[in-house]
Image: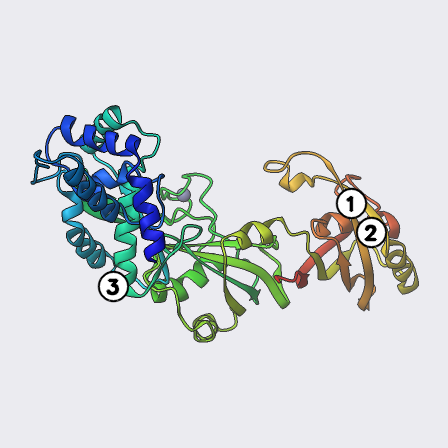
Amino acid sequence: MLGKDSHVEEELEKTEVIETARKIVKEGLGPICDNCIGRQFAKISSGLSNAKRGQILKEVLRTKWKGEEIEQGKCWVCNGLFENLDGWVLKALDALREYEFDSFLVGTKVSGMLLENEELIWEIAGASYAEPLKAELNREIGKRIERETGKTVDFERPDLVVLLNLWTEKVELQVNSCFIYGRYRKFERGIPQTRWLCRECRGRGCEKCNYTGKMYPESVEELISSSILAVFKGEYMVLHGCGREDIDARMLGSGRPFVVEIKEPKRRKLDLRMLEDKVREENAGKLEVTGLQYVKREMVAQIKNAKADKTYRVGVGLKTKVLKNDLENALNTLTGAVIEQRTPTRVLHRRADMVRRRKVHSAKLVSFDESVFFMEIKCDGGLYIKELVSGDGERTKPNLSELLGTDAEVKELDVMDVFYNCN
Ligand SMILES: [Zn+2]
Ligand SMILES: [Zn+2]
């Protein structure tokens, strides 16, 4: 330790450094604090705080520079900021009191006056060894908050950002979202995955939407939100799904993967099993969520880009009767087939017109009744089932209507499984 310190002192006692320090003291606009002088040489010696480095420098100056005084008083560079760190820490702790968090980061909005002072001292001393004021402030306040709260500074992905606003002298908090992965099952038809704004009024509310601003009274997103948002004490919640089923399709089997993003939560360490129960009780027979777990933000992009295989259970109505044997042959033809599918007419208004190639892994007959039958299809994600059945005016090839020689139409559609492994 002693060896290290004396090495540091050697570094600081170099003529060039001392000359610059002397210049700062002589040519500055008034007294300067240890932090502010030490910070101008931050890159010369590491392992010391700026305050300690400043102390050493002033000591050396006093010894070498007998007879001349180093002015005492309020620092002209930081305007006394570094003497009042505790005041900022108290403000920060006060702002943080309501929030549950594990990690945080401190940031500073430096005022114009302090920026100008910093420019001035760099004109005198040069900026090549200096650390910016805001970097020191962030670090020093961060260390103190760590000590007071037992939480840790995280540069990568803090739960909260504590922003010291030197213009307003207030502490502002930026509360980062909390992300939860899970799967949902939807037992009722007619519920979209997310809120749909009314096409007429675009959400403002009009006669057509009964002044709700929405096309449908509820959505999976809103149902989950109404059960869990208040528990997290968040501002609002967004659901990111791994694909989406049609509004009139149920989502069964093991459910569809999703990530919910809770914006500005005050709680972020809730018992997720308890939340699963709460959603189940409050949406009995309608909706269920399972396998909830806390995840990182990246998971949103991961599940949104995932190409997950799907299994559907499809009820099909036929215009004219067919033989069971012909039907089975048709399904055999589909099994293993690569379907060329032009963007369905019904989604053309929001999707680019293009040809997709998707594989049917298997197509099995479940029950048969001459003009209505049920089948189970496992296929690549992104295959439109309604069009695979109807043909969509030859836009999907091959298709079931063509193979059977009669118009076939989806009467009922359930998603049975979404093959996606989140780990
Ligand atoms: Zn200062
Ligand atoms: Zn409306």
Query: Dots 1 and 3: beta carbons under 8 Å?
Result: no
The numbered mark, 2 or 3, whose residue comes first in the sequence reads: 3
Q: Residues within 10 Å of mark 2 (few under 14, many from 20)?
A: many
**Residue at point 45% right, 62% down?**
223
Residue 240 located left or right of residue 234: right
The residue mark sitting in front, 1 or 3, is: 3
Disc 2 designates what residue? 400
Residue 182 quadrant: bottom right
Task: Report the label total.
Answer: 3
Query: Dots 2 and 1: beta carbons under 8 Å?
Result: yes
Disc 3 designates what residue? 148
The residue mark sitting in front, 2 or 3, is: 3
Query: Which amino acid is tagged 3?
Result: Glu
| Camera-side residue of 162 and 190 | 162
For this orientation, the residue located farthest to the top is 123
The numbered mark, 2 or 1, whose residue comes first in the sequence reads: 1
| Camera-side residue of 347 and 89 | 89
Quadrant where the N terminus sits is bottom left
Query: Which amino acid is tagged 1?
Result: Gly
Q: Is mark 1 on a helix, strand or loop?
A: loop
Separation of marks 1 and 3 at Cα, in angstroms: 66 Å
Residue 360 quadrant: bottom right
Q: How is the image coloured?
A: rainbow
Query: Which amino acid is tagged 2?
Result: Leu
Residue 35 quadrant: top left
**Residue at point 68% right, 51% down?**
307
| Camera-side residue of 193 and 109 | 109
